[in-house]
Amino acid sequence: MDKDKNLAVLIDADNIPANHVKEMMEEIAKYGNPTIKRIYGDWTKPHLGKWKNVLLEHAINPIQQYGYTTGKNATDSAMIIDAMDVLYSGKVDGFCIVSSDSDFTRLATRLREAGLMVIGMGEKKTPDPFIVACDKFIYVEILQRDVVETKEKPGQRKEVDKVSPKLVRLIAGTISDLEDEDGWAFLGDVGNLLQKKQPNFDARNYGFPKLTPLINSLENFEVQERENQNGKYKLVFVRNK
């Protein structure tokens, strides 16, 4: 992650929940500096009132977009036009598109074609085409779980995705793609390649804070820690059993 990257954060108020905006912005900050923060919607509509209390707190600029035609979403068009203007300004290194709407699939593809990083953020109902069009896609439900986790009673189970055989095969295949002659692969490289293969891959989806404990929980893999001569942190390697 390059936290020096300047990011444009464009939020679709019609297709994303207003809850946990603080956690959303903290997550985005992991990937860069959000120098442009805009949220789009028809602010004359009562259902968007829940956003208004958090906009000033997080310095998010509301963009008014009236719905010109019943049943048509003018917000999407406004976001896309603004995104292209920002792209051609050359002021940012990447975008964060916050929406669960597949209408932004082509936009994400176009921004990546221009060489910019694209992070998507939305609910689990987000269609696959938009997810795979991004470099990385983060489910807002993950962020919500992080918040409520501290409020859970001892022994209370969180709702997380199950590790499927398909995921195990994906991890195993990725290790095979990167392994050395002895079958070992650096876990950091494995994580990066997993992200490229499946943009919505995130260990937090399965109840683990990082990739290492997720791998450790699976009997299909062997994990080895090695001393790092250039730093204080140990290097983690993994191979298929």
Image (cartoon, rainbow, N blue to C red):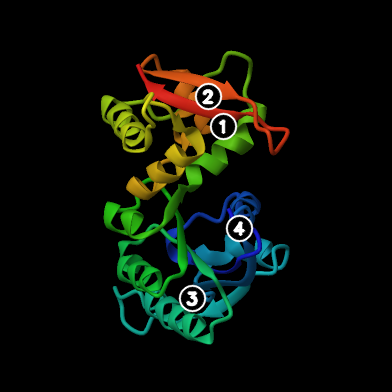
Type of amino acid under label 2: Pro
**Circle 1 — which element?**
loop
User: Label 1: which residue?
Assistant: 209
User: Label 2: which residue?
Assistant: 213
Residue 63 drawn at (x, y percent): 55, 79
**Residue name at image x 59 percent, y 75 percent:** 62
Query: How many numbered dots are placed on residues in this image?
Result: 4
**Residue name at image x 39 percent, y 42 percent:** 194
Q: Nearer the viewer, residue 179 or 4?
A: 179
Residue 189 drawn at (x, y percent): 46, 41
* Separation of marks 4 and 3 at Cα, in angstroms: 34 Å
Q: Nearer the viewer, residue 193 or 228?
A: 228
User: Label 3: which residue?
Assistant: 42
**Mark number, residue 2:** 4
Q: Nearer the viewer, residue 220 or 19?
A: 220
Type of amino acid under label 4: Asp
**Could you classify mark 2 by the number of other residues whose Cα lies within 10 Å: few (under 14), some (14-19), or many (20 or more)?**
few
Type of amino acid under label 3: Asp
Residue 25 drawn at (x, y percent): 62, 56
Task: From the image, state whether disc 2 or disc 1 is nearer to you.
Answer: 2
Mark 1 and mark 4 residues within 8 Å of each other at the beta carbon: no
Whether residue 172 is situated above or below residue 31 in the rendered picture: above
Task: From the image, state whether disc 2 or disc 4 is nearer to you.
Answer: 4
Q: Is residue 198 visible?
A: yes
* Separation of marks 1 and 3 at Cα, in angstroms: 37 Å
Task: From the image, state whether disc 1 or disc 4 is nearer to you.
Answer: 4
Mark 3 and mark 2 residues within 8 Å of each other at the beta carbon: no
